[in-house]
Amino acid sequence: MAHNFFDLSGRTAVVTGGSRGLGRSMALALARAGAHVVVTSREKAHCEETLELIKEHDGTANAEVLDVRSEESIAAFGERVRSEFEGVDILVNNAGCNIRKPVTEITWDDWSTVVDTNLRGTFFVTKALIPEMIERRYGRVINIGSVTSVFGYAGVVPYCASRGGVLQMTKAMADEFGPHGVTVNCLAPGWFKTDQTKALYEDPEWVAYLVDRIPMRRPGQAHDLDGAVVFLASQAAEYVSGQILLVDGGITTGSTRATPGQTNVE
């Protein structure tokens, strides 16, 4: 019988911010691959729809309260997870936020909200769960980045700074944890329609502008991340670490076209 390198049966996965959007879709993908998924949100009730969806697909999951901007919340979450499970095998650091303003309007609190959530939160949640991975010499840490991990965009400077930091942190963590059998990678979505970006998609001119720059000619859909997150969480990726996996429809091949509408060069 052929071995299934993508089977996550018997594994426990944590997905932070898994109550909605891309986090919900990734939680479902991991559950469908066989993992028991711990879904987190700042309010436990917000996870109910995700739990029901996983149950509908014959998966198993439970919800935990976690505020990634709170040191106390992270510590308490780590204690609960350690007491309930033998150890977390897969950590998906998905919780994130964005504030869209020009630099001249960004406040101190705006900066702190974005960077503390996306970068500091990712670091300290990992710190809370990594000791057991190191002890068992097995773990998969998947930090969610963005196309802004490698591209810069006006109007979202704190977000770009945080996502660029996530990529560099991923590389450094991969170097530190690799000798202990733990891989660390950055899964970076391109332009997806989410609660954070839905206002942009209400402008048809902007959507046309965006789609023209994506070789696949459409924005990402939540399910487009399913295969990537399962791959990085699985045995198939046991020698993949310190990498960024861009799931972006090809937009990072180049954000402009030599000739408008041109798709082929003879």
Image (cartoon, rainbow, N blue to C red):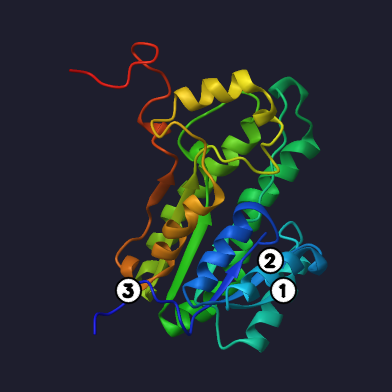
- Quadrant of the rendered structure where residue 158 is? top right
Identify the mark nearer the N-term, 2 or 1. Answer: 2
Vertical placement of residue 16 versus 136, above or below: above
Residue 64 in view here: yes
Q: Which residue is mark 2?
A: 50
Q: Position of residue 211 (x, y in %)?
A: 49, 27
> Label 3 belongs to which residue?
5
Look at the picture and state if 10 lies above or below 95: below
Q: Residue at x 44, y 77 (%)?
A: 8
Quick one: label 3, few (<14), some, or many (20+) residues within 10 Å?
A: few
**Pointer 1: what residue?**
63
Looking at the image, residue 67 sits to the left or right of residue 260; the answer is: right
CA separation, marks 3 and 1? Answer: 27 Å
Kind of residue indicated by mark 2: Thr
| Residue at 48% across, 65% down | 141
Q: Disc 2 vs disc 3: Cβ atoms closer than 8 Å? A: no
Q: Quadrant of residue 57?
A: bottom right
Q: Is disc 2 placed on a helix, strand or loop?
A: helix
**Front: mark 2 or 3:** 2
Could you say where residue 243 lies in the image, as x and y percent from the top left? 37, 52
The structure residue drawn at horizontal position 56% and vertical position 26%, both measured from the top left corner, is: 153
Residue 66 in view, yes or no: no
